[in-house]
Image (spheres, helix red, strand yellow):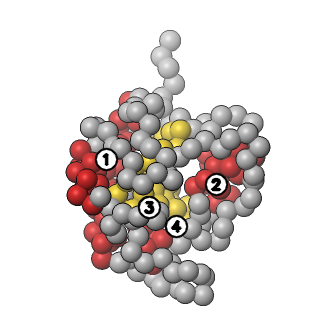
Amino acid sequence: MTPPPTRLLVAGVGNVFLADDAFGPEVIRALQDRPLPAGARVRDFGIRGLDLAYELLDGYDTAVLVDACRRGLRPGTLSLVEAEPPGPGAGAAPPEAHGMDPAKVLALAAHLGDGPLPRVLVLACEPQRLPSGEDDIAPGLSDPVREAVARAVTSLHTIVPALLADPAAADPLGRPEESAPPLTAALPHLEAGAAEDR
């Protein structure tokens, strides 16, 4: 009996009006010119955390969230980290209006559903500019983050085929709270970039 095909979600998250927080949506837009292999569903969720939480409950094996995340690295640095699954009794606070914290979205998804969540990886870009509030509207990416968009598309073309072939591919890649997580040899272009920026 043939196993069912792997289901994989690539989700851009972020607010296009808050400077580098638009990284995720910009990567999803760039993927229109370089589509990922069949089997990967690509979608821009923007700041719709509830929509993303429900989507994560739709039977995916793996999800890759593309987001701007402060991790203490040089602006424009890409990192691939594995999100920590929410623990028992995790709160179900709704995601914020901007920034859509992946941990809050996962906790909400765990609260809404009774089945297992997919493995969640975050392709994170270190931002240079993130306004502090919704009153500080600042559309447009900073130069280092704009340059990282093409590198993120190239990285997804490496990561996604590997995950479609094996949803458990590679060792855990670190946790979001860890600075400069280890990267696997399967992602040499990310590893080299991260090593230069540490």
- Give the mark nearest the N terminus, 2 or 1: 2
- Residue 29 seen in the current view: no
Residue tagged by mark 2? 105
- Give the mark nearest the N terminus, 4 or 2: 4
Who's the residue at 74% across and 58% down the image?
Answer: 93
Quadrant of the rendered structure where residue 26 is?
Answer: bottom left
Q: Are marks 4 and 3 in contact (CB under 8 Å)?
A: no
Q: Which of marks 4 and 1 is in front?
A: 4
Q: For residue 71, which numbered disc appears in the image?
A: 3
- Give the mark nearest the N terminus, 4 or 1: 4
Q: How far apart, in angstroms, are the residues tagged by discs 4 and 3?
A: 16 Å
Quadrant of the rendered structure where residue 174 is?
Answer: top left
- Give the mark nearest the N terminus, 3 or 2: 3
Q: How far apart, in angstroms, are the residues tagged by discs 3 and 2?
A: 19 Å
Residue tagged by mark 1? 157
Residue tagged by mark 4? 14
Who's the residue at 45% across and 32% down the image?
Answer: 167
